[in-house]
């Protein structure tokens, strides 16, 4: 997660309260998704950005997780996500984020 997005997430958590912010990731690889999820829950593991040492404990989900997918109109999902769902590994992406959420997050949907 780049430094600008880290700052945006931090600002949103401060403005609205961590319990009112949900981060939805769209990362295409499981390792990246896991690192991004760790960043918004436990702080930046590289200690390089605005979230270095800042454990926000935010609820974080991947776009492919059932809790998120069921909120999207099926026609819109098919149009916007259908192809990605076929070429990526939705299960691995969902598991990577869920694992980090279970380890670090204080909040869930």
Image (cartoon, rainbow, N blue to C red):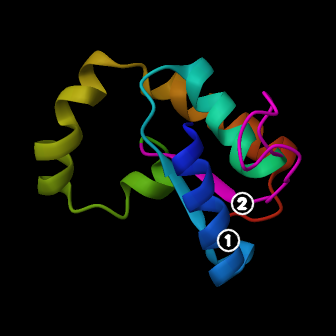
| Crowd rating for badge 2 (residues with CA inside 10 Å; few <14, some 14–19, many 20+) | many
Q: Position of residue 59 (x, y in %)?
A: 67, 59
> Callout 1: helix, strand or loop?
helix
Q: Is 106 on the left-hand or right-hand side of 65?
A: right
> Callout 2: helix, strand or loop?
loop
- Identified at 75% across, 38% down, the residue is 100
- Identified at 68% across, 30% down, the residue is 35
For the question of whether residue 109 can be seen, the reply is no
Q: Residue 62: within the magenta?
A: yes
Q: Position of residue 45 (x, y in %)?
A: 81, 31
- Identified at 78% across, 27% down, the residue is 46
**Based on the displayed image, in which of its 4 quarters is residue 12 positioned?**
bottom right
Q: Is 94 on the left-hand or right-hand side of 80?
A: right
Q: Position of residue 108 (x, y in %)?
A: 70, 63
Q: Is 88 on the left-hand or right-hand side of 66?
A: left
Q: Which residues are magenta?
A: 43-63
Identify the residue position indicated by label 1 in the image: 13
**Rendered-image quadrant of the N terminus:** top right
Q: Is residue 33 above or below residue 11?
A: above
* Disc 2/disc 1 C-alpha distance (Å): 8 Å
């Amino acid at each position: 997660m780049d430094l600008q997005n880290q700052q945006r997430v931090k600002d949103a958590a401060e403005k609205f309260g961590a319990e009112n912010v949900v981060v939805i990731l769209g990362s295409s690889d499981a390792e990246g998704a896991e690192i991004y999820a760790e960043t918004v829950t436990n702080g930046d593991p590289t200690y390089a950005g605005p979230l270095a040492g800042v454990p926000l404990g935010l609820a974080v989900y991947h776009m492919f997780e059932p809790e998120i997918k069921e909120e999207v109109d099926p026609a819109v999902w098919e149009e916007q996500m259908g192809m990605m769902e076929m070429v990526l590994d939705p299960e691995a992406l969902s598991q990577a984020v869920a694992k980090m959420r279970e380890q670090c997050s204080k909040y869930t949907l």
